[in-house]
Image (spheres, rainbow, N blue to C red):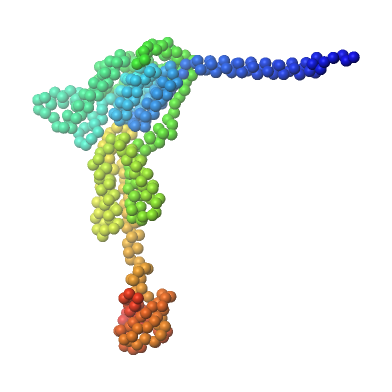
Amino acid sequence: MERYPSRLFHPDTVRALSGAAGLLLRKAVALFAGLLLCSAAAASPVVVVIPLNGAVGPASADFVVRALARAAEERAQLAVLEIDTPGGLDQSMRSIIKALLASPVPVAAFIAPGGARAASAGTYIVYASHIAAMAPGTNLGAATPIRIGAGGSAEPEPGQAKTDAGASASSGMNSASTETTKQVQDAAAYIRGLAQLRGRNVQWAERAVREAVSLSASEALAQNVIDLNASDVPDLLAKLDGRHVHTITGDHVLATSGAVVMTIQPDWRSRFLATITDPSVALILITIGMYGLFFEFANPGLALPGVAGAISLMLGLFALQLLPVDFAGLGLILLGIAFLVAEIFLPTFGTLGFGGIVAFAMGALMLFRTDTPGYGIPVALVVGLTIATALFVFVVSSVALRARRRPVVSGAEAMLGIIGEMLEDVAPSDSGWARVHGERWRVSCHEAPALLARGERVRVLGRHGLMLSVTRLDEVKQGEK
């Protein structure tokens, strides 16, 4: 009789079952722990950090607006707008402020790291945010609007706006001064409304617009321009924990202690938009587009210049409709390119070429009439493009001139001066056959005083249909002597 009546109770079987059960138990525990961690992570508050670096423009405005929308989708506790900007375009600034005012997620404008600033447009963005903070060694202010256009001063002197406004009632003002005053008054009212909405220093906000004053981090805190100072983002989150904030969706109590920090970086769309809306890049795209189309029209069928030119021109025009363009400058650029192209085809002895270079350079300097940081065209770029354009026209003109001086290689004119050989004897008043350029041609020689013998070398003087006029080669040489 067997000691173990069933294999189920065999020691090896029991040990195997015990090992399998232990493995399953360990896996179940690990899965349960993972689910707990995931649920804990999902329950942890999320803080979204949005960097705003460089000049405020169409690209940065699009990025900030989309980042705030994503923060709302993530149900973030807080969105930290980390600012370091010298200013920017008014339209782009207002797009960001509209998104801030409509954001259901509290937004903290944080001027950081040390050495950063929120000048001009950045000051308005700070005032529009639910919470304003600065890192040590930063500053904000100088919010006087820059007037975009020709003539007049870009910025009024301190107190000039009020003085000009009073003088306009008694003695009148020129159009440039009136426009500047209107812009200053509008900007002052705009930032005053933002200061009243957020409960911040209204008087200093108006001074920042009218007198272009600035403040350091400690001074801004002392004058109720900002809400707090923080050394970095973790320090900011620690100080904001438990703070009450009011948004369009109601009151919020921030729970930022131990929050998961998620930084949103610009994607390829934002980087591409930032590249093509750079004024220097826009000017280069316009220039490449015009020359590409010129080459395609001058040499139909090449395809590559036309495709590259059309794409570059469309990208350049797209950038121009987003930027503050002076259309007089754009017209001078197009006129200059037209003159340079005409110089290649017309014998103007450099007059059109010189005029085109001058028009192109002046148009490039006038294209973006603004003192906004980051939205001017460097003089070095204008000089480089002008020199490159002048060299391009010189090279093309030289090639065209050499091509005109070359002998004709096709058509009736190509037969003139070619040497042939008589295939038969031909009398002076008769015609015969000759081999010219490897072909049999009917020839006549009315000027020859004697018979043209077979094998004699002749030179072609003219062509009349399928008949060539020839003369003896030795007679041509004697005439040349």
As drawn, the residue found furthest toward the left would be 170
Point 26% across, 56% down: residue: 350
Q: Measured from the top left, where is residue 478 in percent x and y?
A: 33, 83
Q: Nearer the viewer, residue 426 or 150?
A: 426
Establish if 376 lies above or below 413.
Answer: above
Q: Is residue 194 left or right of residue 73?
A: left
As drawn, the residue found furthest toward the right would be 1
Q: Nearer the viewer, residue 4 or 471?
A: 4
Point 88% across, 15% down: residue: 2
The quarter of the image holding the C terminus is: bottom left
Establish if 396 lies above or below 454.
Answer: above
Q: Is residue 378 left or right of residue 237?
A: left
Residue 14: quarter of image = top right
Establish if 93 lies above or below 203.
Answer: below
Establish if 340 lies above or below 366.
Answer: below
Note whether residue 318 is visible: yes
| Badge count | 0
Residue 70: quarter of image = top left
Q: Nearer the viewer, residue 1 or 367?
A: 1
Note whether residue 473 is visible: no
Q: Measured from the top left, where is residue 161 in percent x and y?
A: 19, 25
Q: Measured from the top left, where is residue 447 in percent x and y?
A: 30, 84
Point 52% across, 17% down: residue: 41
Q: Measured from the top left, where is residue 273 in percent x and y?
A: 38, 35
Point 64% across, 17% down: residue: 28
The quarter of the image holding the N terminus is: top right
